[in-house]
């Protein structure tokens, strides 16, 4: 597995470079006024410095989390409970991640993220099971805040403080997404360097994340504070004013806004069948990914795979899928996002079907499992931009955040149920990694992916003549239906 992993990372990075060059040739970057505006570029740089540090710290914790728990001699069934605690805390804290900025203020909530994630990383130094559970709960809170609060601060300052055009927003988020892929690949390499090449152990990447989070908090505290104080006398308008009377009114207002937002999101979800089907696809597909995050390490680690390099390979495969999406939907090939979404779900189903055979007890085939994992990550790279496009088309902008929050609820619940089922089977049979629990779980994931494929087909059968589900290009505006 050692040679296979190193060869795979070289080939995947070469593939990514080739797809990037092809994408630049087919979709040349367009010059916008935002690129030439020095004030905007400075503001964008201030945001990205903090946001990318936060993402880097998050990715550093990916490759060796399971390995760390095994290093502390916990059983797979105990590790499954730790993962469930993290997912359950994501479910519990997801509503609060939208409510906290309205109470504390956006910048203060970002500082809370840095503090909670630092504490989460430091708990990894303990071998006490309940301390590690507390760390997973903090990790769930931090993940919820990372996915919403940083972007909320940027959008607020972009529109309300600097009064930049909304059309410039994608410029920043596209750049952040591009850097995010590179950071994920680099994090695996650095984690492997620390844990295996320098023999510092699986806890080393978590300790490296702490100074990164401290630097992120410093940028948020200083540079972001200057953006608010220097450009707007109001600063972060959602910060609570002093004094009990005003404070009580503001808390009531924030609570009522949060309740109304949840109600509007649920009503939008239930009133539009397209939204409901899209939510079903997201819940099924992404819950499988959460289960995959738990399972890939115990499948490959017993065969001597360098986990950091394997993690970089998986992230490079995802990057290749994202670049392939850009090439496939260009005016040269004119594939619709609906076609790409179907292809992604079909590829994911096939990879999980492969895994039900490559993880047969007593006859493991790690190379085939590794190939199936790469195929699944390639499917992820195709899936996320396609589903994001469709969400933007079928979900109203003002209700999108609350609808997506409702999407995440069944997503995390399905993942928790899957991991609890795995925990029950392992603890009931005492089979551990040598038993059939892993294979059965991949079989269950394949069934869930098949259901997701049926939901995708139903969605586009329902919207056969729906122009909102099409990617309009100059050459394809007047062409026929998607299907």
Image (tube, rainbow, N blue to C red):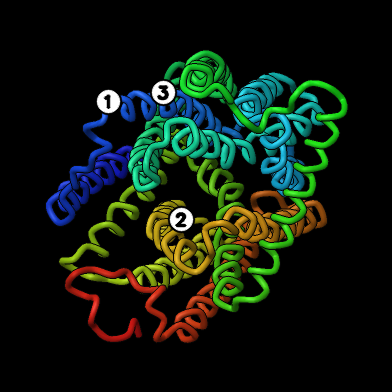
The reply to whether dot 2 and dot 3 touch (C-beta < 8 Å) is no
What percent of the width, then of the height, locates residue 351? Answer: 45, 64
Residue 216 in view in this figure: no
For the point 54% across and 59% down, the residue is 359
What percent of the width, then of the height, locates residue 30? Answer: 19, 47
Mark 3 or mark 1, which has the lower sequence index? 1
Mark 2 or mark 3, which has the lower sequence index? 3
Residue 410 in view in this figure: yes
**Residue count near mark 1 (Cα–Cα under 10 Å), binned few <14, some 14–19, many ≥20:** few
Query: Which residue extends farthest left?
Result: 25
* C-alpha separation, residue under disc 2 versus residue under disc 3: 42 Å
Q: Is residue 441 above or below residue 45?
A: below
Quarter holding the N terminus is top left
**Residue count near mark 3 (Cα–Cα under 10 Å), binned few <14, some 14–19, many ≥20:** some
Q: How many marks?
A: 3
Asked which secondary structure carries label 1, the reply is helix
Give the left or right position of residue 371, taking residue 423 as reference: left
**Mark in front: 2 vs 1:** 1
Q: In the image, which disc is placed on residue 46?
A: 3
For the point 41% across and 81% down, the residue is 466
Asked which secondary structure carries label 2, the reply is helix
Which residue position is annotated with label 2? 369
Give the left or right position of residue 406, taking residue 457 as reference: right
* C-alpha separation, residue under disc 2 versus residue under disc 1: 49 Å
Which residue position is annotated with label 1? 38
* C-alpha separation, residue under disc 3 versus residue under disc 1: 12 Å
For the point 52% across and 56% down, the residue is 364
């Amino acid at each position: 597995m050692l040679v296979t992993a190193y060869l795979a990372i070289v080939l995947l990075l070469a593939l990514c470079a080739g797809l990037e060059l092809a994408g630049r040739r087919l979709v040349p970057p367009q010059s916008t006024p935002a690129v030439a505006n020095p004030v905007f570029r400075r503001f964008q740089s201030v945001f990205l410095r903090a946001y990318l540090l936060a993402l880097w710290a998050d990715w550093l914790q990916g490759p060796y989390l399971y390995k760390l728990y095994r290093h502390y001699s916990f059983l797979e069934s105990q590790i499954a409970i730790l993962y469930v605690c993290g997912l359950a805390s994501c479910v519990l804290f997801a509503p609060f991640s939208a409510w906290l900025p309205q109470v504390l203020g956006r910048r203060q909530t970002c500082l809370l993220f840095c503090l909670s994630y630092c504490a989460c990383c430091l708990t990894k130094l303990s071998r006490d099971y309940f301390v590690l559970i507390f760390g997973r709960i903090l990790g769930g809170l931090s993940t919820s805040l990372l996915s919403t609060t940083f972007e909320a601060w940027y959008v607020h300052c972009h529109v309300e403080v600097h009064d930049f055009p909304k059309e410039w927003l994608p410029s920043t988020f596209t750049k952040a997404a591009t850097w995010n892929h590179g950071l994920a690949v680099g994090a695996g390499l650095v984690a492997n360097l620390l844990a295996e090449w320098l023999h510092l152990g699986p806890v080393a990447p978590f300790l490296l994340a702490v100074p990164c989070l401290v630097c992120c908090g410093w940028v948020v505290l200083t540079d972001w504070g200057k953006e608010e104080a220097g450009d707007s006398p109001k600063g972060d308008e959602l910060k609570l004013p002093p004094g009990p009377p005003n404070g009580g009114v503001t808390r009531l207002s924030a609570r009522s806004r949060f309740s109304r937002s949840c109600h509007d999101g649920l009503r939008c979800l239930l009133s539009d069948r397209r939204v409901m089907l899209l939510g079903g696809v997201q819940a099924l597909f992404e819950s499988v990914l959460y289960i995959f995050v738990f399972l890939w390490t115990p499948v490959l680690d017993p065969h001597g795979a360098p986990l950091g390099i394997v993690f970089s390979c998986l992230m490079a495969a995802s990057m290749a899928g994202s670049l392939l999406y850009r090439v496939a939907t260009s005016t040269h090939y004119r594939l619709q996002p609906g076609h790409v979404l179907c292809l992604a779900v079909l590829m994911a189903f096939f990879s999980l079907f492969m895994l039900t055979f490559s993880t047969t007890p007593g006859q493991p085939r790690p190379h085939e499992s590794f190939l199936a994992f790469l195929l699944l990550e390639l499917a992820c790279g195709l899936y996320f931009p396609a589903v994001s496009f469709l969400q933007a088309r079928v979900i109203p902008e003002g209700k999108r955040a609350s609808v997506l929050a409702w999407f995440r609820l069944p997503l995390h619940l399905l993942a928790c149920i899957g991991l609890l089922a795995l925990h029950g089977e392992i603890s009931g049979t005492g089979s551990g990694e040598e038993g059939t629990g892993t294979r059965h779980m991949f079989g269950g994931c394949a069934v869930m992916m098949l259901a997701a494929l049926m939901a995708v087909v139903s969605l586009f059968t329902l919207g056969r003549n729906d122009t909102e589900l099409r990617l309009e290009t100059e050459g394809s505006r007047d062409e026929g239906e998607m299907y």
